[in-house]
Image (cartoon, rainbow, N blue to C red):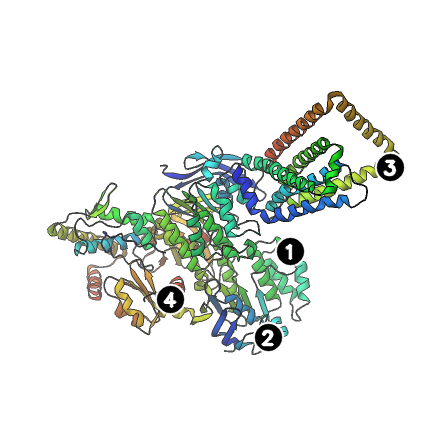
Amino acid sequence: MTGDLDTPEMPRMRVILSNSSQEPIYEQIARQIRAQIISGELEEGALLSSIRSLARGLQVSVITTKRAYEELEREGLIDTVGGKGTFVAAQNPQFLREKRMSLVEEKLAAAVAEARLVGLSLDDLSEMLRLLAEEE
Amino acid sequence: MWNLIRKDLILGHRTLIVNGSMALVAPFILLLPDEPPPVILYVLYVGLMCTMLPVGLIAKEEKFSATAFTCSLPMTRRDIVTSRYLGGWFIAGGSMAVVLALGLTVGAVRDLWSDGASGGLLAGFVILGLTIAIVIPFTIRFGMNGLLFGLVGLQVLGMVMFLLALATGGLDAVERAVKTAVDAVGSYHEGVGPIGFAATVILGVAVLNWLSWKASLRIFRTRDL
Amino acid sequence: MEDNVLEIRGVRKRYPGFAMRDVDLVVPTGHVTGLIGPNGAGKTTLVKLVMNLITREAGEIDVFGLDNLLHEAAVKARIGFVYDEPSFPHDVNARDLGRAIGPFYKGWSSERYRRLLGEFGVPERKRFKALSKGMQMKLALAIALAHDADLLLMDEPTAGLDLEFRRDLLEHLAAILEDERKSVLFSTHVTSDLERFADFITLIRDGEIVFSLPTSDLRDAWGVVRGAADVLDHLDAPDVRGVRTGPNGVEALVANASLARRRCGPEVVIDRPSLDDVLVLMTRGDSYVESH
Amino acid sequence: MDELLVVERIQKAWDVVALDDVSFRLPRGHIMGIAGPNGSGKTTLIRLILGHIRPDGGAIRVFGEDPGVCGRDIRSRIGFVLDRPISYEHLSVARLGRLVADFYSDWDESEFQRLLDEFELPRQRRASALSRGMRVKLGLALALAHNAELLVLDEPTTGLDPVFRRELLGRLSAIISGGRTSVLFSTQILTDLERVADFAVFLRNGRVFFSGPKDDLLDRWAIVRGGPELAAAAGADAVRGIRKSRMGFDVLFDDMDAARPYCDGSSVLERPTLDDVFLLLGSKESQ
């Protein structure tokens, strides 16, 4: 009874959501789609599920999928052509790597700010980073 | 509007069948006494039984508080009240015609009509109009038990007035009043002749129904479901 | 196409012991709005006002941009309505209802109605009285969903139904919502159903709209601070939306969890609020609190 | 720890099998929640425990006795709040209390009055005029006033708003905190079960798919959400349920470590909620 999410020409887009993780759902969606674009699983020009059919598939609110797509659009990874749908934007590997690097930088900066607020020293922070890196 | 009547017919078909068969059989009771009743009494009786059909539908809907659902259909309250009256005339009138027609197949009933068919039909029309005009607003306002209490209440009221009249010796006053009313109608009947008389009666019933329809509209429009 | 399927402005309604004063509410088109609130808060009253089942002392209600008094029939023709106690004559069955009601709606499809009855497991010929309460509700849902309504207005449609059916219903609604002209207003006490599915949550209490917010805000921005009583001193007063004190500490609902985190430091528990938490913590008076 | 209620391999069937080989135990001073779709046998089970009907096979022991045999004195130690309207509900709350008092030898009138105050129940109002939630509380007050040792409630929280439900669940916890009384309740709202139950029983089509400490489900079990490749996990013995999702499969494991190997980078491994358990337990949608 649950109609199939993907119409034939849409690629198999894989988004698996966790209920218990602290990461907001729209970020989980954005993260997984971003990873599949960067890894090439979703090639350039591929048509993505619409905001509403993805929301239906994942049984989440339409606003959540809209927000995820907006974030990816801001990052230039996807673009929406009025009326026709949302496609994976043209990427060149160099541009992609740079963007990934700046993303990492952004996240690290945020982590440093949080650490300073809570009174963590640089050593504590780098120790935490080492642990996290190993765990992955 | 016709959708509403059609809905009532479909959803109420079981009740209609029950009440309808009663309306079909009951008039024959009048034939039991050896001396046949005047046709007017026969037609009045059939009319009363037949108006119970539409009224039964409204009462049933009230009983199961299904009125809220009816009001959620794409209809205005005005449509619903109007359909009650049109439905009332359509169902009661239709069933009455059927019962009277079937009655004709029985010899004893056919003879009743010999002494004044037109008077009988007029009486049938009047009883139909009166009952619908009185009962529908009552049922809309007070629902099923309201209707029952109302009917019982009317009978009790009648008895009380009768006893009062008896006690105060005013019985003959009441009698005189009734007599003069009957004479007035009788003389008016002579005055304008049967056609004129029938026309005024029909007009009267029509006006009464219109007023009753107006009253029902006001009652129903402000009712919270 | 209206961007708000429903606009309620300055509505006033009084019952003995209950008053709704100047209520304003906007329900966006193309989305699911969850209506939550304690019993007697006015959820059913709101729904009945939209369907014009009850009169109002003041205020206007526009549905699909049309005034619901002036265009009563046109508005109701596009609404699929489920009322928390479905009331049909007791001796009718699903087939009768379909035949009687179909002609009222342009978009009615008896094929879709039969498919819904089949999917919900509603017997076509069994009399209404003989159906269980849950089955009666499923029949009412089948009727509401059978005429391709633009607005599904549901007051407690899943009371007493099991999780499997509730998830199937949400599937149905999600399929309908793929068309962005359709909208759903869904009042329920089982808020876990709305948690991920509803786009907006409207909380109503004592006849007043407390807030109408995107669910993701409640889920991602808000938080429940759980700790000892002194944790309240760290919190920023305007940010606290509700507090409950219990034998073993306090629960505070905050509208900005990250701010609360910065104020209270890492060791205080700040959970993501469930909609039950939001409702319980925003209802005045901490009557009995469990000792668990 | 004495067991107030022992259900052993119960069989019960009318034209269709209602209960098939159902076993579980409820120790004193604990809360057990029974969950299951409509028509899974919950109400039948409750009627068996109250001795209203007798099982076709297996045995039920309430306080060590068979409720079908000596139902009368067992029932005096049980308090039940059923989904049906209260009998004699045309009476006012106070008079209903006096009437029920005569049935029970160890009725405690002062406790009943205290409970009426604590539960904020209007004494003069007719029981039939009470709201649904108030009716459940009245049932609780009546049961506790004859200091029942086992409380049986059939879907007490259905139709109640979250504020009232949380208060009611709070009362159930308070009732068992004395260690003398146990509570058994059926529910469709799994967050309620998650909140207060010590033990959980999951029924589907009359069969028990889980019976044990609720925390096992929340702390030991695991759920893997992933793509089509998870179909292969169906055979594993730690798998208790597998169900199609839009992106592939959700697989329920009864042990986190057993689930870990099935979780690669792009799938999710997490603790299940009781909603997940309800939907996945016993389903085999991999074929």
Q: Nearer the viewer, mark 1 or mark 4?
A: 4
Residue labelled with disc 3? B166
Mark 2 vs mark 3, CA separation in Å: 68 Å
Q: Amino acid at mark 2?
A: Gly
Disc 2 is attached to a residue of which chain? D
Label 1–label 3 contact, CB within 8 A: no
Residue labelled with disc 2? D68
Question: Is C84 in front, or is B85?
Answer: B85
* Residue A101 in the image, given as x and y percentages of width and height: 15, 53
Question: Is C56 in front, or is D281?
Answer: D281
Residue labelled with disc 4? D283
Label 1–label 2 contact, CB within 8 A: no
Question: Is C159 in front, or is D131?
Answer: C159
Mark 4 vs mark 2, CA separation in Å: 34 Å
Helix, strand or loop under label 3: helix
Residue positioned 78% across, 23% down in the render:
B187
Disc 3 is attached to a residue of which chain? B
Hey, which residue is sitting farthest top in the picture?
B191
Helix, strand or loop under label 1: loop
Label 1–label 4 contact, CB within 8 A: no
Q: Amino acid at mark 1?
A: Arg
